[in-house]
């Protein structure tokens, strides 16, 4: 159950990050004007910080739920201290790009180096579960990359086009993920069977 929950978190993060890479420039242009867009390089850094930040929060909440409170609190305190200490020098040396790189390094250096190992030990993941988790993460990243690549040259002159392109992008991502990820296919089949059994049982009781 935990592996499935973590996989769905990674799948949502992957599709959102791919969408930000492809559509954020058009969104900013439509919302506040092209002059406010900081460039694709900064956009990539923002997406990287967003992805690592969300994964860090998921890992932190999972550890709290599993009872790892003291060490988790220390990691969060270390991340906060590192972010505050690195903010001014990174901003001074590299501007916005330096600030984003500093945030990325702080988050990766602490949370992503701690949470995967700690969660695996707390729940005692076996080799099959570890392999399934890593495979699912790789499939989500690959599907998001493929979908983002297909839509990288698509322009959205208006809000309606942006919304439509976003829907098409999500559809392509889902199809690619279904083709790549056997775990997702099994989850959908299992969920369909459970829903069918529930509906049949409900109909039987109604009669």
Image: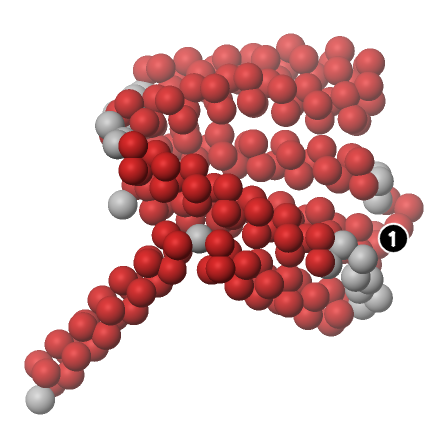
201 sits to left or right of 67: left
143 sits to left or right of 115: right
- Figure quadrant of the C terminus: bottom left
Q: On the image, numbered disc 1 is attached to which residue?
A: 33
Which quadrant of the view contains residue 206? bottom left
Q: Secondary structure at mark 1?
A: loop
Image spot of residue 43 (x, y percent): 75, 39
Which quadrant of the view contains residue 127? top left
Residue at 82%, 14% in the rendered image: 93
Give the colour scheme of this rendering: secondary structure
Residue at 33%, 27% in the rendered image: 119
Does 29 sit above or below residue 203? Answer: above
Q: Nearer the viewer, residue 69 or 7?
A: 7
Q: Is residue 77 visible?
A: yes
**Mark 1 Cα-neighbour bin, 10 Å: few <14, some 14–19, many ≥20:** few
Residue at the bottom extreme of this rendering: 207
Residue at 52%, 36% in the rendered image: 54
Image spot of residue 92 (x, y percent): 82, 14
Q: How many marks?
A: 1
Image spot of residue 104 (x, y percent): 63, 25
Residue at 35%, 15% in the rendered image: 71
Which quadrant of the view contains residue 72? top left
Does 16 sit above or below residue 118? Answer: below
Q: Is residue 19 visible?
A: no
- Figure quadrant of the N terminus: top left
Does 180 sit above or below residue 10? Answer: below
Image spot of residue 146 (x, y percent): 64, 53
Q: Nearer the viewer, residue 151 or 100?
A: 151
């Amino acid at each position: 159950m935990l592996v499935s929950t973590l996989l769905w978190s990674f799948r949502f993060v992957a599709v959102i990050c791919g969408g930000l890479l492809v559509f954020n420039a058009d969104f900013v242009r439509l919302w506040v004007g092209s002059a406010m867009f900081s460039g694709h390089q900064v956009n990539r850094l923002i997406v990287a910080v967003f992805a690592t930040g969300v994964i860090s929060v998921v890992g932190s909440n999972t550890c709290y739920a599993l009872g790892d409170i003291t060490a988790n609190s220390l990691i969060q305190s270390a991340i906060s201290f590192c972010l505050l200490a690195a903010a001014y020098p990174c901003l001074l040396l590299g501007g916005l790009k330096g600030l984003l790189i500093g945030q990325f390094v702080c988050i990766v250096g602490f949370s992503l180096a701690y949470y995967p190992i700690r969660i695996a030990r707390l729940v005692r993941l076996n080799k099959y579960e570890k392999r399934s988790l890593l495979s699912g993460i790789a499939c989500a990243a690959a599907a998001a990359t493929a979908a983002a690549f297909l839509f990288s040259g698509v322009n959205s002159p208006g809000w309606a086009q942006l919304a439509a392109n976003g829907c098409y992008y999500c559809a392509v991502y889902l199809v690619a993920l279904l083709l790549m990820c056997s775990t997702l296919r099994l989850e959908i089949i299992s969920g369909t069977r459970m829903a069918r059994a529930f509906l049949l049982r409900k109909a039987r009781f109604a009669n």
